[in-house]
Every structure is written in structure tokens, then in C-alpha cells.
Image (cartoon, rainbow, N blue to C red):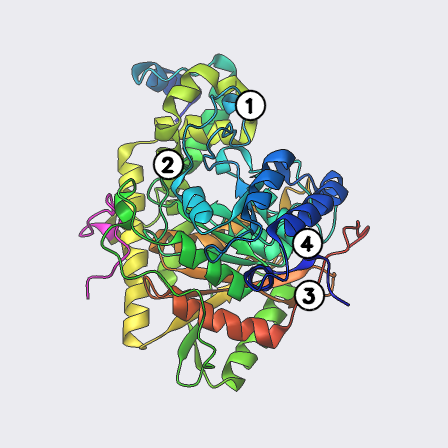
Amino acid sequence: MNEQTVSAWARMLRVELPDDRIETVTAQLEGQIAQGGGLPADDVEEIEPATVFEPEWRE
Amino acid sequence: MTPAPWALDMVEAAELIRRKQLKPSELADSVLDRWRAVEPLIHAFVSVDEDRVRRDAKAQDGRSGGPLHGIPVAIKDIFDVAGWTTGCGSKAMSDAPPARNDSAAVARLRAAGAIVLGKTTTHELACGVYTPPTRNPWDLERSAGGSSGGTGAAVAARIAPGGIGSDTGGSIRIPASHCGLVGIKPTYGRVSRAGAMALSWSLDHVGTLTRTVADGALMLSVLAGPDPADPTTLGRPPAPRAHISDEGLRGMRISVLSGSPFDRIEDDMSAALGRVTAHLEAAGAEVTEARLSELQAGLAAEFSIVAAEAASYHEARIAGRASLIGEDVRGLLETGLLLPAAVYLRAQKTRRVIQEAFRRLFTERRLDAVIAPTVPAKAQLADQLDFQLGGQSESVTQALVRTTAPFNLSGLPTVAVPAGIGVFGLPTSVQIAARPFGEETALRVALAVERAAGPVGMPDLQERPGK
């Protein structure tokens, strides 16, 4: 992950990202991706994501 | 001596109005006097329409009405109120046209007889834990918390007896803890979100800030219920009752959550939790300790979900008006637009794991409730960026959200309740979570905590230099 990658990525996704924002967003995005969204992939391999969240439990 | 009407709690005021011992117009005049006196110190409101408040209250004089007949309420400025701009604490929203209709929550409050006192400040786009320029009535150098900090400050300062907020990662419970209030984040799907600005569709909860558990229960009973405009509210169990059972806790089974993310907390918060635990046992509850290792991944999941969903919600706004959004929120939104879908979905998988961990804990131990510190620390100074906790420096935002987010991710009903005043003269708090749609159980435990801890009293609206 570097600023050139983020800049190119933003262009591809048509996200308007001014040059003076690239450094900040690169650092934040790097941090978010490093966190991986939570648990390691191996630990959630069989889990269906909660894309439609339902608070009631399946007993 | 009879207290001034502005000092009355919600249930007290409603009862006096029902008995015709207090007119809604008298209460409104008194509350407006209080607002004028106190608002310059705490900056809790973005708008108050005095004439409209007086007119609405006068129209209710001498009549009978719903359970909130004549009660003024504070509305976080992310909820639509017909005829008012919904500013969401952001310059990017400042020229939005006035809302055509009331949000579902405001409509329900009005239908129950409540009077909209005004709109309260929010951290920008409901995404933060400071809510500038609002200050904490317990110490004017400190933050009231966020993002529902305006409602929190207004209720703590006795401007309004109660109000509504939203909680995506602690935004009701953090101000509740900082301001010595009862904050209810109901079960996901309990209260309609229609007509409220979203931050994160799958994590947003609408709830209440009040000074007592009884007041919170009354407001929740009015707010809860199905709304076709928010499908998550359909087909749910009956709304919780307005009056919470005072049967004590004998036979109840409660676990105190320990370990990460509830470790590294200030001594005040730790001592408060210890006192509360002793009270619960003395009241007849069977109290055990529990650790859920899955919760360690909660903060990363929370931030990934919020970043992706908030960026999607505000995508058009970022494209055209990003420069009007404050640095902290803008960075999160821009990052969210670029976050890989795989990271978002991993976060939603993590959420499922956390939900299942809570289900297993409640089921295997036959628990009624779990209890934990609401936040790790007392209210931060308005410009404070980090806490020192357990010998480590931790950002204020991360620290406050790590203990509250597990209950947004799980969707469990959670009540933050004051647990006494700490050694610095500031409120402490614990949060109680119950099974899905078990608000009455959480409130019953909260009532026992409230009785045992005693009232936190009224803040003196002073600075506490050096504390």
C-alpha cells in the first residue's frame, strides 16, 4: 500500500480524492486493511456474514 | 420545598400534569427559563423555537392526553422534525431544506403528548465522541461525550427531562456515562430509524437519555413498535411496558464481563463495577464472571462496518462537499469508499461470531443479563486526544468505543446507568445487556443498580480545574 496505489485505486473507483488528501487516506486505509475487519480469515471460514442483520438468535 | 418544574424528572412531571397540579404551559415556561440560564454554559442546542414550544404547551393546558402529555423533549439533530433543517452537526448539511415530515421517533413522541423543545448538538454526522461545542455540565472543561452529546448535556443540566439520541458504537451510552444519565440502546429493530440520518444502517439504534430508569422505560414504551418505513421493526415481540417491575433480583443470573475489551479501565470505573456487583449479589442475584475472547476483534469489525456503510450513505456528499466535512469524519468516509469488500464482509463475519458468542454465553449459563463498565474512563477534556489506561496510551475514541461496540455488533438491548460519583467528582457508569428484546430485564437490573447507587445529584455547572 502506497500513495500511488491509493491514488490509482481512487481514480479507478471514480472517488474524488484531492492530492492533499492522499497521504492521510493512505495511512488510514493501510490501518483498516491491516486490522482485516476483525478476526483472521481462517477463523471465519465457515461463517456467513451478517449482511442482513437479525438480532434474534437461532436456538 | 417544591422543586421548580424544570427540575422535575419525567415521570414526576407527567404525573403532576395528569393530576392537573401542573400545567404544560407552566412546565414549558420553566424549562425555557432554565434553557436561557444554562445554555450559554453548555451549548447543548442548535435550535429552540420558544414561541412554538409555548404555543404547543398552551394548547395542551386543561386537556388529557398520552403518557408524555405536556413533557418537553430534546431531539438530537439527526432526526427530522417537520419544518426544521436536519443539520447533523455538519456544514455539509447546513443548507439542507427543512424536513417535510417528522421522523418516526419524533412522531411517536408527539403522538404521546410530548412537546419538541428543540434540536440538540451532535458530533458531526453522528460520528464521534466529543460533540463540540457542547460542554459537560459536571465539568465545563470536559466533553459531554458523543455523538448524542447535546441531548446528554441538556438532560443532565435539567433543561429537558429526557431526549432521544442514536447509538452506532456507543453514541447514547457514552454521553450517558459522561453526564450521569440513564442511556437506553434498545435491541436492533426495536425502535424505528425512519427519518433519522443514518451513520451505519446495520449498527444504528435509536434510544433515550433520561435521568432515571423509570423515565427511560416510559420513553421507550412510547418509541418502540413496528413501523412499515423501517422493516427491521416488523414482526417483533410486544413493546416493553412503561412501568418496570420492582421485584428485586432474587433468582436472576448475571455475569460480569471481564478481560479484553473491558480491561484497562480507570480505578473509579473499576471500583464502581465492584460496588454494583456487590449490590446485585446482596439483592439476591447469582453473579458470575465471564470472558468472551471473541470480543477482542469487535473494535476492528465495528470501525470497518461503520467506515464502509457511512461512506456509502454519504457517497454523493463526499463527491461534492467533502471540504465542508471536518477532518476526523472526512478521513473515515474517504477511507470507507476505498475499503475492499472483503474487509467489510470479514467484519460482518466477525460480527456473526460475536453474536453467537453472546448467545452461547446466555444459553449455557442460563443468564438473564451481563454487566460491564460502560466506558473505561471519566469524561475526557474537550481537547483531550488520549487516555492513559493500564500503562498504555490509547486514543479517546478507541477507548470509549471498545467497551460499547460489542453491544451494537450483537444488537442486544443495553442500558447504561449511573453507578455513583467517582473521586474526581464525575459520574461513573455500568452497562447492562439482556437477551434480544429483553429490555424489561435490562431495565429491571438497571433499576436495582440505580436504587443501590443512589442519585448522582445535580451537576453544578462549574469547571473543575486540575481534576
Q: Is residue B129 left or right of B159 when viewed as pictured?
A: left
Distance from Cα at disc 3 to Cα at disc 2: 40 Å
Residue drawn 27% across the image and 61% down it: B237
Residue drawn 31% across the image and 39% down it: B344
Residue B91 is tagged as 1
Distance from Cα at disc 4 to Cα at disc 3: 23 Å
Hey, which quadrant is residue A15 in on the image?
top left
List the residue tagged with mark 3. Answer: B421
Q: Is residue B393 above or below residue B322?
A: below
Instruction: Give the number of the mark in front: 1 or 4.
Output: 4
Q: Secondary structure at mark 4?
A: helix
Q: Are marks 4 and 3 on the same chain?
A: yes
List the residue tagged with mark 4. Answer: B6
Please report the bounds of the magenta region as a residue range. Answer: A44-59
Count numbered badges in the picture. 4
Q: Secondary structure at mark 1?
A: helix
Q: Are marks 3 and 1 on the same chain?
A: yes
Residue at the right extreme of this rendering? B465
Q: Chain of mark 2?
A: A
Secondary structure, magenta segment, majority class? loop
